[in-house]
Image (cartoon, rainbow, N blue to C red):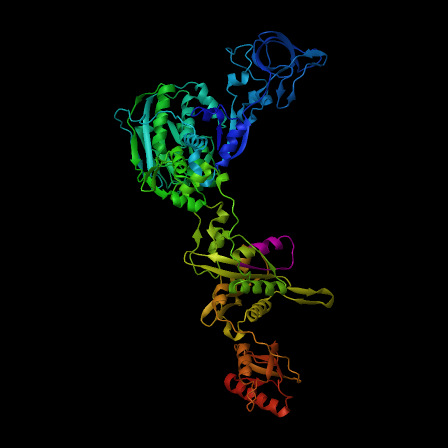
């Protein structure tokens, strides 16, 4: 937000404050002044007139000039290509201090030079505010410029000082210079006098103008016909204030629309009356076509964009920019004023998509006070009558209403002091509210204030307390030591589980990642293990960050793709993150394996990234979290859009689905630019909520163990897990009831020659042992025979010959 000393001085007396003092007071009250600097600078300047101009004898671009300074005529060597006899110019006399250094007498290629004829950029004026002609040569002054006048910058209106203020999101009201002036007046405790323009637009004859709206995105629209105006140059004060705001002066009518926007914060648009056929305007959306805007660029409209239409054709992108075919020209003799409120989310989306940020769109996005359209149209009519000879004015046409403007808040001195930890008096608090134009009244100790319409940030007692402390001064807060109750620093149960999961996976060779919580629509649609509706942001920073994710894997696959594209052969990563939908928030774990998990090149050994490696990682994690493997089941995975249909599984605990794991589907892998990825996503919240087994210490047995191997022929469709469960079931000694089967390991699965087509051979190693004695062959044989009988009876398993 830019303002200037000259602009603020129109409304209050600032003569006793330096620029630095003014900036400090505004910053201390909560509106940070990010920069404060003069619009131009230079000492010992004077307006002169070139009375002679000749080419330098030793140069093809220098000129020798004689310049009348009023009290003397001096010779100056000038290199500007546009210098000529008869011009009135700005001269820096010897001893002048300019932004580029001090000017001294000297000789240039043998010719005496007593000063410098100046261009505006040499006097510190921002080149962006200058035309190409001004940037390429000296400044040529009007013919009526007084020769010998010692304040040429003041004569041109460049004797101003700029303040750039960083507004916080809740203070969008200060985008309006009138509101900013009231704020500064409250800070400095000075009287603020604003121009009188209330009800200036109430005049007008009957109109036949037709105004309508076909969209809910335009709650208020004001339109007014001005039948006759005169296009001419703007007054000096208006051009100076536009310049201070970083805007160029065009003509009186266009400048009035811009100055009103800056004063009231309300964007408005003027249409050439001849460009609006049948005196009709409709606000609508639903258009999908190309449209050429005021900047001459053609944009593609989409159905969600709000547009201003005439005879069913767009004549402006609402809240952003008008059309090239209805702009104000030098030949314009009448105009139509548009002043409206639009949905700020829609304006932001259109602005971002079209990459078309304007002063209007920025103000709509940040928020405009409800009464701003009425103030703006009143001020515009007043200025058009005064500076554009406006006549043939018709009555204002309005669609929509503004309701519930009056807001009354209540508080007590005790409430404010309790919240702030202060002891402010009633007189101090009432003074703050009066300075803010809150019209305070007190009855039985309760202060009632009426909030002005432009203070949309004021919601309750907390906001009133903030106003009190920032205007009285934060230095009035008492210095106290913070009260900090002693607490034991330790992890809770959920934090311990997360820490354990991180440690286990990291120790197994995986690297932890953190990816964006906000994702694109494509990643949202590819959510894995998502049981909730995704939340869409009202104002996303980009299309890639539109949704809050309900699944981690689509984002983690992006990490794999990024690394594989840079020739990393082994990318094994995991991420733990919250995922959130409309109904609930959960914590998920995602894993991606691509390339060997571990490698020992000189031994030609590696742990490959495959289905069984991923399954082993998950089983190790379950063990570490105290979840018995017997509670976890791997069943058929029906998600064939993301996972390979025959190399994946659904992970269940009882009837509850914990997640999915397996090889990525080739089609989905191609869409994500990845290769050979095995992935999994688990609902960690479910694991956290389940009851865990207590980890018990069991000493290592001091007695020897016995190992026996057996190979079984079983049906090809029989899960090996069923065999393991049956062996464990019969692993106890029938007499002592001690469990003597200590380990069960499947070390080979064979399908092929010597085995029927519908069968497979499974080789199993069983380790027997006791914690109380050395086992005898008889004890082992009894248990072993029982196992074989049960395997044959229950699973139709036969010993392989």
**Along the line of sight, the residue nearer the viewer: 11 or 148:** 11
Residue 216, quarter of picture: top left
For the C terminus, the image quarter is bottom right
Figure disc tally: 0
219 above or below 762?
above
- Residue 774 pos. (x, y %): 65, 88
- Residue 619 pos. (x, y %): 56, 70
Residue at the image point whose x is 45% and y is 45% from the top: 421
Residue 670, quarter of picture: bottom right
Give the residues in magenta. 558-576
Left or right position of 677 against 350: right
Left or right position of 781 against 337: right
Residue 762 in view (yes/no): yes
Residue 683 in view (yes/no): no
Residue at the image point whose x is 39% and y is 26% from the top: 194
- Residue 528 pos. (x, y %): 49, 60
Q: Is residue 500 magenta?
A: no
Residue 367, quarter of picture: top left
Residue at the image point whose x is 42% and y is 46% from the top: 418
497 above or below 4?
below
- Residue 635 pos. (x, y %): 49, 71
Most distant residue in the right direction? 602
């Amino acid at each position: 937000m830019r303002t200037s000393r000259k602009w603020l001085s129109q409304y209050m007396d600032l003569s006793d404050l330096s620029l630095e003092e003014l900036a400090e007071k505004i910053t201390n009250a909560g509106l940070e002044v990010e920069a404060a600097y003069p619009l131009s600078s230079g000492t010992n300047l004077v307006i002169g007139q070139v009375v002679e101009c000749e080419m330098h004898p030793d140069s093809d671009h220098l000129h020798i000039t004689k310049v009348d300074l009023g009290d003397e005529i001096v010779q100056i060597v000038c290199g500007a290509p546009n210098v000529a006899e008869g011009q009135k110019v700005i001269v820096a006399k010897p001893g002048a201090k300019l932004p580029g250094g001090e000017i001294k007498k000297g000789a240039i290629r043998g010719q005496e030079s007593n000063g410098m004829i100046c261009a505006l950029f040499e006097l510190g004026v921002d080149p962006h505010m200058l035309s190409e002609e001004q940037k390429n040569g000296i400044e040529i002054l009007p013919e009526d410029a007084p020769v010998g006048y010692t304040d040429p910058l003041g004569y041109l209106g460049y004797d101003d000082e700029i303040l750039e203020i960083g507004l916080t999101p809740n203070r969008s009201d200060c985008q309006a210079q009138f509101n900013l002036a009231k704020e500064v007046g409250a800070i400095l405790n000075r009287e603020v006098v604003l121009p009188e323009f209330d009800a200036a637009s109430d005049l007008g004859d009957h109109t036949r103008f037709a105004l309508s709206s076909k969209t809910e995105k335009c709650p208020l629209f004001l339109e007014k016909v001005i039948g006759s105006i005169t296009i001419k140059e703007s007054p000096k004060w208006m051009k100076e204030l536009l310049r201070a705001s970083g805007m160029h002066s065009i003509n009186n009518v266009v400048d009035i629309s811009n100055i009103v926007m800056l004063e009231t914060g309300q964007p408005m648009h003027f249409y050439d009356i001849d460009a609006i056929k049948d005196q009709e305007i409709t606000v609508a959306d639903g258009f999908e076509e190309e449209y050429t805007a005021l900047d001459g660029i053609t944009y593609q409209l989409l159905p969600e964009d709000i547009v201003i239409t005439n005879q069913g054709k767009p004549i402006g992108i609402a809240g952003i920019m008008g059309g090239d075919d209805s702009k104000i020209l030098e030949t314009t003799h009448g105009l139509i004023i548009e002043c409206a409120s639009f949905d700020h989310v829609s304006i932001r989306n259109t602005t971002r998509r079209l990459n078309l940020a304007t002063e209007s769109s920025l103000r709509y996005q940040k928020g405009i006070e409800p009464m701003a359209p009425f103030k703006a149209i009143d001020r515009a009519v007043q200025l058009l009558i005064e500076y554009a000879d406006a006549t043939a004015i018709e009555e204002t046409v309005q669609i929509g209403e503004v309701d519930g403007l009056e807001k009354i808040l209540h508080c007590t001195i005790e409430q404010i002091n309790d919240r702030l930890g202060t002891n402010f008096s009633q007189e101090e608090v009432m003074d703050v509210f009066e300075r803010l134009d809150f019209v305070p009244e007190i009855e039985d100790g309760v202060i009632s204030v009426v909030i002005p319409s432009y203070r949309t940030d004021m919601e309750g007692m907390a906001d009133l307390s903030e106003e009190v402390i920032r205007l009285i001064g934060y230095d009035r807060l008492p210095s106290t030591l913070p009260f900090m109750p002693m607490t034991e620093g330790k992890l809770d149960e959920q934090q311990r589980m997360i820490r354990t999961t991180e440690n286990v996976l990291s120790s197994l060779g995986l690297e932890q990642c953190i990816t964006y919580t906000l994702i694109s629509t494509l990643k949202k649609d590819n959510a894995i293990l998502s049981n909730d509706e995704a939340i869409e942001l009202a104002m996303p920073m980009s299309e890639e960050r539109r949704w809050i994710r309900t699944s981690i894997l689509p984002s983690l696959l992006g990490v794999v793709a990024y690394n594989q594209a840079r020739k990393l052969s082994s990318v094994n990563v995991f991420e733990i993150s919250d995922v959130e939908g409309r109904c609930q928030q959960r914590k998920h774990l995602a894993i991606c394996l691509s390339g060997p998990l571990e490698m020992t090149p000189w031994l030609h050994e590696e742990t490959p990234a495959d289905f069984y490696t991923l399954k082993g990682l998950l089983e190790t994690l379950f063990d570490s979290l105290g979840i018995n493997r017997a509670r976890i089941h791997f069943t058929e995975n029906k998600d064939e859009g993301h996972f390979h249909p025959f190399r994946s599984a659904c992970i269940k605990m009882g009837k509850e689905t914990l997640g999915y794991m397996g090889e990525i589907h080739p089609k989905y892998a191609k869409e994500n630019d990845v290769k050979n990825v095995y992935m999994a996503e688990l609902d960690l919240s479910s694991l956290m909520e389940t009851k865990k087994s207590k980890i018990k210490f069991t000493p290592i047995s001091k007695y020897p163990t016995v190992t026996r191997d057996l190979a079984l022929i079983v049906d090809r469709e029989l899960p090996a897990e069923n065999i393991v469960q049956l062996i464990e079931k019969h692993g106890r000694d029938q007499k002592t009831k001690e469990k003597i089967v200590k380990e069960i390991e499947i070390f080979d699965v064979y399908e092929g020659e010597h085995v029927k087509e519908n069968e497979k051979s499974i080789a199993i190693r069983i380790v027997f042992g006791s914690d109380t004695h050395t086992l005898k062959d008889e004890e082992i044989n009894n248990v072993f025979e029982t196992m074989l009988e049960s395997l044959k009876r229950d699973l139709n398993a036969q010993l392989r010959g």
